[in-house]
Image (cartoon, rainbow, N blue to C red):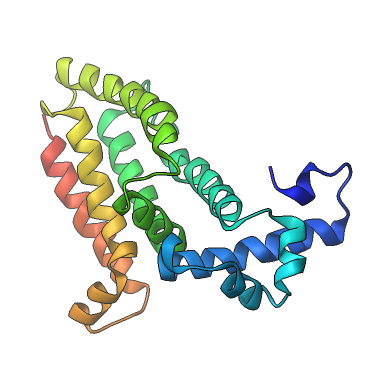
């Protein structure tokens, strides 16, 4: 919980300032990583003084953790929406497309997460080994049951999920490379990727 949020009945201005700081911090951390970012940079990006920032957040670590907590909740929502009672191929293909949409709409959040993991996930290791693992195991169980019933091809459910992460988050984490190779920076590249990945996973999952 942030300093401002922990105060009783924060004002509209306090809530707005907290959001402005987090928006600025997202830009700084996703660009520079945790180690390269400073509170001075965040304060400058937010258009406030460092002492004013420290009124809302006690440290760089606190700002970063709040961003990561928000990110994890948002990032896991597409996986939560896989319905074990749904049509298997449709559920998995819809998950692929939701993840690709997130790569398109939340590239900074994706890079923030990637930077944290590349550093060994020191600030979210508990979340990865706890809630994330539990959710993945739960959905892997549904995928395994679909495969056992012959409703999709036999697949390793965990590696299927990993491959979806890799195939979709690449478009956010390596966006500069994708745009350079394609020679374009319009959203059509995501439309093309969606068609290609839908085709790939349709074939891979066909029983």
| Vertical position of residue 182 compared to residue 9: above or below | below
Q: Nearer the viewer, residue 148 or 112?
A: 112
Q: Is residue 76 above or below residue 138?
A: below
Locate residue 91, reporting x and y percent. Answer: 33, 35
Q: Nearer the viewer, residue 70 or 61?
A: 61
Q: Is residue 34 visible?
A: yes
| The quadrant where residue 42 appears | bottom right
Q: Position of residue 206 (x, y in %)?
A: 12, 34
Could you tell me residue 152's position as x and y percent? 17, 27
Residue shown at 33%/49% (left/top)? 117
Residue drawn 69% across the image and 66% down it: 20
Q: Which picture quadrant has residue 157?
A: top left
Q: Is residue 2 above or below residue 22?
A: above
Q: Nearer the viewer, residue 134 or 120?
A: 120
Task: State the residue at coordinates (35%, 21%).
Answer: 138
Q: Quadrant of residue 90?
A: top left
Front-most of residues 129 and 98:
129
Residue in view at x 38 percent, y 35 percent: 128
In screen coordinates, is 65 left or right of 94?
right
Is the N terminus in the top left, top right, bottom left or bottom right quadrant?
Answer: top right
């Amino acid at each position: 919980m942030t300093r401002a949020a922990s105060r009783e009945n924060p004002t509209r201005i306090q809530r707005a300032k907290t959001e402005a700081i987090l928006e600025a911090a997202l830009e700084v951390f996703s660009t520079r990583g945790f180690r390269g970012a400073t509170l001075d940079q965040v304060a400058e990006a937010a258009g406030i003084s460092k002492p004013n920032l420290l009124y809302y957040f006690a440290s760089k670590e606190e700002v970063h953790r709040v961003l990561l907590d928000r990110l994890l909740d948002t990032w896991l929502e597409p996986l939560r929406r896989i319905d074990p009672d749904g049509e298997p191929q449709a559920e998995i293909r819809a998950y692929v497309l939701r993840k690709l949409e997130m790569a398109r709409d939340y590239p900074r959040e994706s890079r923030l997460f990637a930077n944290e993991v590349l550093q060994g996930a020191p600030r979210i290791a508990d979340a990865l080994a706890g809630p994330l693992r539990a959710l993945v195991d739960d959905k892997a169980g549904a995928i395994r049951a679909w495969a056992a019933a012959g409703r999709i091809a036999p697949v390793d459910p965990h590696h299927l999920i990993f491959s979806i992460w890799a195939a979709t988050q690449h478009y956010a984490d390596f966006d500069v490379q994708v745009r350079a190779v394609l020679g374009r920076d319009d959203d059509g590249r995501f439309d093309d990727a969606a068609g290609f990945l839908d085709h790939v996973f349709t074939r891979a999952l066909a029983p």
